Structures are given as C-alpha cells and as structure tokens.
Amino acid sequence: MNIDLDYILDTTVELLGIPSPVGFTDAAMNRVGEELNALNVPFKMTKKRSIIAFIEGENRNYKKMISAHLDTPGAVVKKIKPNGRLELINVGGCPWAGVEGENLTVHTLDGREYEGTLLPTKCSVHIYGDVAREMPRTAETMEVRLDEDVHTAEDTEKLGIRVGDFVSYETRTRITENGYIKSRYLDDKLCVAQILGYIKFLNDYNLKPKSDLYIYFSNYEEIGHGVSVIPEDLDEFIALDIGLVGADALGDERKVSIAAKDNKTPYDIEVRKGLMRAAEEMDINYTVDVYNRYGSDASAAVLQGFDFKCGCIGPSVDASHHYERTHIDGVIETVRLMTAYL
C-alpha cells in the first residue's frame, strides 16, 4: 500500500506547532476541520468543540469509530506572585522535571502571547548551592520567568496576564536522518495525522472502509472526558493513542502497539484478536501491551456506560509526557494496521 508518509509527517509537524493544552484546543481543532474539508469528509462540531466526521463504508449495517485527541499536557496560571513571576498548575499530567528549563508561551484571554521560561524558584547553584540541585520540583517550587520587564504582580497584570490563562510549552520537534521523531506532544497529534493520512489514502485510491466509519477528534482526553458524544448505532470503537516504551511495557518504537488492558478496563478480546489477526495476515510488526497508568478515549467512554466493543492501537513512544520519541517505522506499521483492520 502506498501511504503518503510525507503528508503524515508534515501534518504532524504542523499540528505540533499549534499550541493546544487541555481546554485551549480551538485553533488546532479548526485546522483539522479545514483539512477534513479539503479531503471532502463531512463533519460536525460537538458542543464541547470536538469533531465527529463520517465516511460511508461498504457494509452499512456495522458501524465502527476511530478517534485521536488534539489536547496535550500544558498548564494554567494559578497565581501571579509578588515578584511578577507566575505559579502554574498542571493540566494533563506532565512531570515538572520534564519541563524544567523549557521555553513557554502564556496565552491571554484577549489573544496576546508572552514568552517565558519555567524554572525552579531556587535554580542558581552560585546562589543556592546544593539546595538548587536537591530541591523537589513541585508546583510551589516552580515559576515562570517572563521575558518582560516585570518585578511586581502589578507589572505582570498590566500586560493583561490573569489567573486562568493557558500556558503551552515549546515542543522542540525534530525528525532525524535515521527516522526518529522527537517532540513533546506526539501523544496524540501524531495519531491525528495518521488518521488524516488514512483518509487521504482512501481518497487517493477511491476506496471505502469495510464498514461505516465515524471519526472522532477529541479535545479533553488528557483529563478523562474526551469522547462524550457516542453515535447511537455504534458497534465498535478503536482509539488511536500512543503505545508505551519502558521497563514495564513491551512497546517498541518501530512497531505498532495493540492494547490488551489499561488502568480502566480490559479491551474487548474479539477486537484484540481481530487486530492481531489483521497484523499477522499483512506481516505487520506489532506488540500486545498492558498499561498500568494509562487510559484512552475508548476506555473512558466505556466507563460512561456506552454499549460498544472497544480497542486501542498506536505507535509506541518512549518517555511519554516528557520529551517523547518514536520512529517512522512505528508510524508506518500503525497506519498499515489501521488500514488492514478498517
């Protein structure tokens, strides 16, 4: 099959360049809407401003849905400190050590943007010695140093910065010559781009899915309520989300991951077997994984009481919610499995 890998990678890089911490996703969602229009795929926006698209399949009697989420970890301004610096609160579960020293942008309600850096309150070893090395990294011990001439809370407030403003971190996106993709927020913008690449494949070759297909782009997955509108006739839901690479995971950056269970529920055994069978028939490199601290849009929707079979697949990513990395091979294997199964 001729997957347009350049399209998937270019779309990934473009989406990564659009800040979209949980609760601040409209610009990224609108960009996906523009792309669906270009691909001639009908869609609607939910009241929460996520997207549900639809593609007619060969079998009109069985309905599948796939999803990926555009929201990412980030932060919200919790406090403007007396020295003019900002205390943040996390959205989406990023460890403070994972963003220490990172450049960021504060997004005000009236559309202004201000650059800054996240630093410990005691960061200079020349001043604080071992305290700077050993101090725990918590919300209370981290602060934003704004790249503005501010020294008091009043100085910062005059810029239009308020408690509740969203904060996005620089992604530092890189694609290496030997095929590694490094960036913050591969979870889950890479999967969004893979779904768009699958739709482009259908268009390029005038193909239909085996069955009717809903496509859901969600915007609150990182905090557990990404998919909240389920079509009444839905039979099966496959979430596209990252697999994990680490000591207690079998994930491989060059393979697609098929989830057997996450911390919410086992995934449907018949769906898992169907995904494995499709992978083996097409000689697709895959792993089957169990995740202890992970949930997807599909497993979260099941817990809401909706009645459908669910599964989860995705490219395995190292250092999830930190400075993430995967490989182009895993991207290709994921799209191959998605295409073979759908």
Image: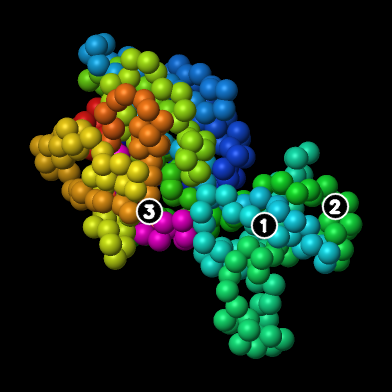
The location of residue 247, given as percent across then percent down, is 29, 65
Q: In front: 174, or 262?
A: 262
**Residue corresponding to mark 3:** 293
Report whether 63 appears left or right of 174. Answer: left
How many labels sit on residues? 3
- Magenta part, dominant SS: strand
Tag 3 secondary structure: loop
Q: Residue at x 41, y 30 (%)?
A: 304
Q: Residue at x 57, y 74 (%)?
A: 136
Q: Position of residue 293 (x, y in %)?
A: 37, 53
Q: CA distance from mark 1 to mark 2?
A: 15 Å
Residue where numbered disc 1 is placed:
88
Q: Quadrant of residue 121?
A: bottom right
Vertical comparison of 329 with 236: above or below: below
Relative to 277, does residue 176 appear above or below in the rendering? below
The mark closer to the camera, 1 or 2, is 1
Q: Which residues are magenta?
A: 312-324
Q: Earlier in the sequence, mark 1 or mark 3?
A: 1
Say which label, 3 or 2, has the lower sequence index: 2
The label number, if any, that marks residue 157 in the structure image: 2
Sequence-first tag of 1 and 2: 1
Q: Position of residue 135 (x, y in %)?
A: 60, 78
Task: Give the amino acid at mark 3.
Answer: Arg
The answer to whether residue 141 is seen in the rendering is: yes
Could you tell me the amino acid type at mark 2?
A: Glu
Residue 129's disc number: none
